[in-house]
Image: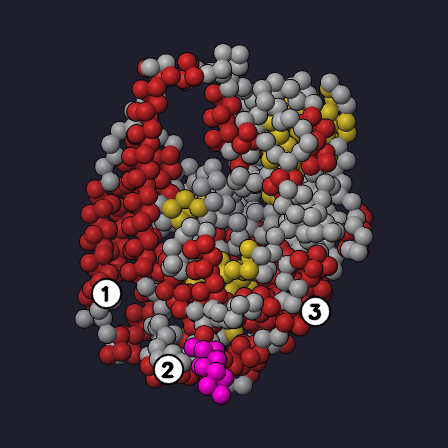
Amino acid sequence: MKQLFTTLLLLLVLNGYSQNSIIGFYSENTNKQLQLEKSFEEKLNATNLDEWMQKMAAEPHWVGTKFGEENAKWIKSQFESWGYDTKIETYQILFPYPTERVLELTGPTQYKAKLTAVPVEGDPFTAQGDALLPSYNAFSTDGDVEAELVFVNYGIPKDYEELEKLGISVKGKIVIAKYQGSWRGIKPKLAAEKGAIGCIIYSDPEDDGYGQGDVYPKGAYKNKTGVQRGSVMDMPTYPGDVLTPGYAATKDAKRLDRKDAPTITKIPVLPISYEDALPLLSALDGTVAPESWRGGLPITYHIGPGPATVHLKLTFDWKLVPAHNVIATLKGTEFPDQWVMRGNHHDAWVHGANDPISGLVALMEEARAIGELAKKGQKPKRTLVFCAWDAEEPGLIGSTEWVEDHKKELQEKVVAYINTDGNGRGFLGAGGSHSLQAMVSEVAGTIVDPQTNVSVKDRRIAANIVNGGDDSFNLYALGSGSDYTPFIQHAGIAALNLGFGGENGGGEYHTIYDTYPHYKRFKDPEFAYGVALANTAGLITLRLANADVIPLNFSQWHSTISNYLTEIIDETESMRKEVLKHNKMVSLKSYKLAADPTKKVKTPTKEYLIPYVDFSPLQNELVILNETISEFEKINTTSLSKKSLEELNKRLMKAEQMLTSEKGLPRRPWFKHQIYAPGFYTGYGVKTLPGVREAIEQKNWIEAQEQIKILTNTFKNFNTYIKDITNDLK
């Protein structure tokens, strides 16, 4: 009996129902909220997720397809049945469909790439023939080129630095790069900047194939014919419709001429399987690739150039297609003009069982459960807006066009945006605005992990420790790659991105193998983590919707931002030491004497010294800001009048906007946020304090000091904003 009592008590603690307080809630409202959350959790049903995935992933449904439109209409009908005011908002966006794909090895031997993934036994979805979207990279330019081939490893900046040391140029060549290492769009972008005339991207089996595990259908990983589709739009410049930068792609919108669209690649680019890559790489000669460049194919990896020559020809049908966003609204009882938004996309490259349907069914189950509670009189205080976005895959297009269309209203009304995408078995991954970190951490501590019966927070922390991290729960910073981007980085709205994974490995990403049978076997067989995601995101949504005080914590935000600045300062000092060391080695002729005389290696020359950068304006402003935040957090909000509390919440809603600059980042004004942005040469990968960090990484010292001034002003404006709130409430 004692053991049973202890177990029950532990479960109550884990589920949060023994809490005496919740961040943002007054004591008299805490128990009511916890009971609501318990009722919500009890309504979640894994069977719904399973059935809905089977329905929505039954056929290919990329943007512009009939089945994609049918899915949108069905999603709309579901939300309406749950009591939501629902509509479909449609935009006309440019989307290229491949009409000709030719890749040939023309010398010294000949081979014509198959460019086709084979159906597998036991998965009928892979045998749908012409209904399957051909493998290609969206927003590659058309082209017909033939040239010598050069292997460039992952095709990222440090790889081109290595090529320069080896005296190898890609000018006038076609490059072949491995997937991974960076976002795929960086590979043709950099190749074009270096003078290449074409780009091929393949999945090396060491990274994404039999080097990771058994291949499909025996195991989850990519077989020799699998090809990863994906967009190569230059999204670090701006996402969304390529012809309407910064404004919505409505039916009558003024559009750029396609030849003037800056985010379409400058050179043709095509993804291929490792079966098709093997003959090309085998035909290369020249310098043997560095050890770190070598993959899992049974060859000696050479760089070239040549003697392999390849012919690459691509043509596309460039046309406007409809992108259907489903927008479902549940009006709040007390604050209808304060919105908590929740989103996941519905379009896929092919069937998209994992990406995105596994996240979408979790979102829908949240909405269904909340709708049932609302019908019983338990409506949220703030308005909930659930969104199923279209055209995410080709470039975050549906969400971006919608945000651009409604930007002014969103900046007035949205409390926060919560995003999900693919989901699977494993550990909670949570990223976003660090002012939301304390609240997310608190919620994560109440959700029970389906496999271990500890909280998903504790399991995440355990994984962090095992992998060399610390024992804290932290949000990661948001770069790009999903529909949170236009909200946080363009409109300045606090955002989160949530999902489980880490124990759901596979090679189905953006291939014809991302199907329901694959998902059921290898990803989340019982949809237990789909329910965990619905529970986690649902509780965050409900707390934001019902909180007495919007649950932002600026102390944790300040600590994180201070760490980012320390990283930049330390990196600058490290760069300085490396240059001094390098120049000394050049003077001593160390590189030349240590080099193998039989190998052609370019002797390094001295580099410019790294100047001392004045970070003191940022450091001083962060000290002042810390004092202001401390004063703000001393405010006893329980003593505020109803009017003062409403005014406080309205101002807290706009706090994230104070971290933006209308001018945006250098060379990409669409990105307004001064704390988080995708890297110009990393794509999805985040750059924190991006204006300053990237200027230093590019050794543009004048720009670095300019960006320090801009960021200092951002901190000053944020400080003034928080100080004014504090003074008005005293």
Expressed as whole percent of the image width and height from the top left, the position of residue 280 reads 69, 27
Question: Mark 2: which amino acid?
Answer: Asn
Give the class, few, some or many, for how many residues have Cα within 10 Å of label 3's Cα (few <14, many ≥20). few
Specify the quadrant of the image occupied by residue 446: bottom left
**Residue 674 appears left or right of 187:** left
In this view, the residue in front, 554 or 68, is 554
To which residue does mark 3 refer? 51
| 2 and 1 marks in contact (CB < 8 Å) | no
User: Does 513 sit above or below residue 201?
Assistant: below
Q: Circle 1 sits in a helix, a strand or a loop, which is it? A: helix
In this view, the residue in front, 360 or 209, is 209
Q: Circle 3 sits in a helix, a strand or a loop, which is it? A: helix
Which badge, 2 or 3, is on the more N-terminal residue? 2
Question: Mark 1: which amino acid?
Answer: Phe
Give the class, few, some or many, for how many residues have Cα within 10 Å of label 1's Cα (few <14, many ≥20). many
Our reading of the magenta stretch's main secondary structure is helix
Residue 29 - label: 2
To which residue does mark 1 refer? 632
In space, the residues marked 3 and 1 are separated at their CA atoms by 48 Å
Query: In this rendering, which labeled residue sits more in front, label 3 or label 1?
Result: 3
Which badge, 3 or 1, is on the more N-terminal residue? 3
Expressed as whole percent of the image width and height from the top left, the position of residue 690 reads 38, 43
Segment tinted magenta in the rendering: 1-13
